[in-house]
Image (cartoon, rainbow, N blue to C red):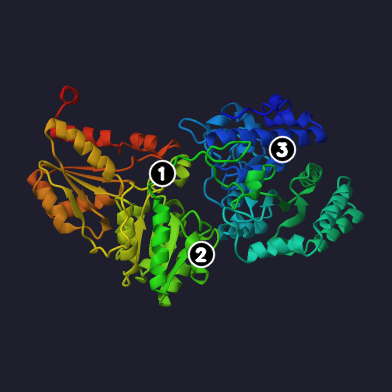
Amino acid sequence: MSEKPNTPLLDTIQAPADLKVLSDQQLSQLADELRAETISAVSETGGHLGAGLGVVELSVALHSVFNTPHDKLIWDVGHQCYPHKILTGRRDRIRTLRQKGGLSGFTKRSESAYDPFGAGHSSTSISAALGLAVARDLGGAPENGIGDTIAVIGDGSMSAGMAFEAMNNAGHLGKRMFVILNDNDMSIAPPVGALSSYLSRLYAEEPFQELKAAAKGAVGLLPGPLQEGARRAKEMVKSMTVGGTLFEELGFSYVGPIDGHDMDDLLAVLRTVKARATGPMLIHVITKKGKGYAPAETARDRGHATARFSVVTGKQEKTPSNAPSYTSVFGRALVDLAAKDDRICAVTAAMPDGTGLGLMAERYPSRTFDVGIAEQHGVTFAAGLAAGGMKPFCAMYSTFLQRGYDQIVHDVAIQRLPVRFAIDRAGLVGADGATHAGAFDIAFLANLPGFVIMAPADEAELLHMVTTAAGIDDGPSAIRYPRGEGVGLEMPETGKILEIGKGRIIRKGSRVAILSLGTRLQEVEAAADNLAALGIKPTIADARFAKPLDHGMILNLARNHEVLITIEEGSIGGFGSHVAQLLANNGVFDTGLKFRSMTLPDTFIDHANARDMYEFAGLAAVNIETTILQVLGISQIARSHA
């Protein structure tokens, strides 16, 4: 446990209204204390550190100038919202961040009135802020009203098409609203693309201090009535910051860039635009991710996501493991295949390290593409690569792949293009909670004709499935695998090609058959070991494929057992539903088979560690045992006396 910092001024803050009585100098002191408190809290809980440290001054300034929660402050993604939570009455719970029953690591409407719009995915804030602004002008929510709407969006998030769609619509509607472009030249991975270069030029072509001084001088002229001199000053700032042209063409008034760590600048600009804006306004703020904490500032990802750590050294407390992560197994397998086949390439959307493509990018940079936060484009780009004769692996988290679903249907599946989807973070992911859970990919992919969908039971199976996917050239395929370490198996040197649509029998038993898809197989085997004490020895099968199903194996299991249970780390409507359809079409239920499908429940599961989440979901070993006993009519009392 780290020693808590000395925060005399922060200790007096119970809500943003308390900031209104502070002087500008005190607000600067408050920012320093807020930064120290954020570092201290995250050192105990782990979480997203760097983004929050970059917006400490901005958080203080926004809550000081605007009247939240009447004014609606929307943080894009929410990685940077910890300082905001501390200022908005949640400091007493900040050391429960991302823990079971504690504060969410993102903004969450049900958690606080100061979180008017929940997040977890990027590039939604401008659309939401515009919707709130229109609702305000149409008389929505008359019981509490809506004041100004403010979206804080990073330069990485701004690269997504949705952000520009929202900007275009906002400019057309002309509603008063504010967009704070938090430009730290760093999203999760370094931002890529033309927009990033464009923003960089705004403060690279002229000495930044000169731009800052010009902006500050112009702002000093604005508080009085808008006179000709003030208009000339505004034009001077605009002419020096030529990049504002892009945003102004979209209908936004533009101010910036300004130093996001200079409280005087921030307060002056925000007070002025709040007093004078009549339509949509974009304020371009330059910040530094990880600001004020050396270990974060010097980290490759600027301290984006961290485990618990020592405040003094920055060293993270990670539990050692001899088992490789599924992500690293995929990354190494892909590099080995790419060494043998120069048509193999990789696409990801702003997550090269998170998806294991760092090594691929290092070894084969010309065949590795990070398209930025642009999943829709990434999927269709991969489809184009496939149409051109390449063998693309499109590596995305399950939760982010949802954003490219229309493209999966129209640009990949209908055209039967051999795009290979590597779906990381499948199933429940722990502290990131519902927004990042990979719950739905089986359901939304398995209903598409021509897809091959695989789910490994362990890291060796993942190696084989990556090898198998590389050889599928007649249509799309997907491999889904969880976050975290594998089982700890001895890994084969090379992968083997699996027969498409064929599962495997793990144990032979009687009466009960358990058909598992994915890494719940370890829980299934643990449950079977416990049931052996009651004389129940289930047959255990590993489906390997959610599509195509192994018809022969499944029908054989159903016809030779009293009970058939399917288990998957996915939602209702997935693997179990397809098995039930197969059984129904073949009249198996007419024989009296007792069938149960164990899936994630029909609810969004809040953040906790992964084991607790799976227990809540009813997919742990004890839940499997209980289900089998209930279906067989064996009471829990009999079990406890065994």
In the picture, which quadrant includes the C terminus?
top left
Which dot marks residue 321? 1
Q: Dot 1 lies on which element?
A: loop
Could you tell me the amino acid type at mark 1? Ser
Which dot marks residue 386? none
Above or below for 50 versus 379: above
The image shows residue 321 at horizontal and vertical percentages of: 41, 44
| Disc 3 target residue | 60
Above or below for 471 versus 490: below
The image quadrant of residue 409 is bottom left
Q: Is residue 41 left or right of residue 460?
A: right
| Disc 2 target residue | 361
Q: Which residue lies furthest to the right in this view?
A: 229
- Which badge, 2 or 1, comes first in the chain's sequence? 1
In terms of depth relative to the viewer, which is nearer, 415 or 191? 191
Q: Dot 2 lies on which element?
A: helix
Could you tell me the amino acid type at mark 2? Ala
* Label 3, residues with CA under 10 Å away: few <14, some 14-19, many ≥20: many
